[in-house]
Image: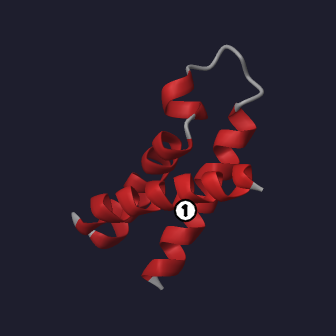
Amino acid sequence: MILLNIIGMAALGHMGADFFEQFEKLPSKPFKCNQCLTFWLSVGPFVYQYGFTGVAMAACASIVSELIYKLITRV
């Protein structure tokens, strides 16, 4: 179940970063970066659900999001 949560948040962060790409006035770091957006979207729910371990899970989700981005842009 934890792995499914990490993959789900990674996919959500990747989709969010792709959505925010169209807005020019938003800053690029917290909104348009896959890794940054995934971390900040997932750290709250993960810490609420799993405690301090949620920070590590949010970091893992952000790395999985970046891997998704690398796989998609490679094709």
Quarter holding residue 27? top right
| Res. 54 image quadrant | bottom left
Residue drawn at x 59%, y 51% as measured from the top left: 13
What x and y, as percent, mark residue 53? 25, 68
Residue 16 is drawn in which quadrant?
top right
Q: Judge left or right: residue 39 versus residue 72.
A: left
Q: Judge from the rendering whether residue 73 lies leftward or rightward of residue 5; answer left or right.
A: right
Identify the residue at image location x=63%, y=52%: 69
15 over 57 or under it: above or below: above
Is residue 23 shown above or below 3?
A: above
- Left or right of residue 10: residue 40: left
Left or right relative to 24: residue 27: left
Q: Residues within 10 Å of mark 1 (few under 14, many from 20)?
A: many
At horizontal 71% and vertical 41% (from top left) the residue drawn is: 18
Q: Amino acid at mark 1?
A: Met
To which residue does mark 1 refer?
A: 9
Report the colour scheme. Answer: secondary structure
- In this rendered view, identify the residue nearer to me: 63 or 52: 63
Name the residue: 44% across, 45% down: 40
- Name the secondary structure under disc 1: helix
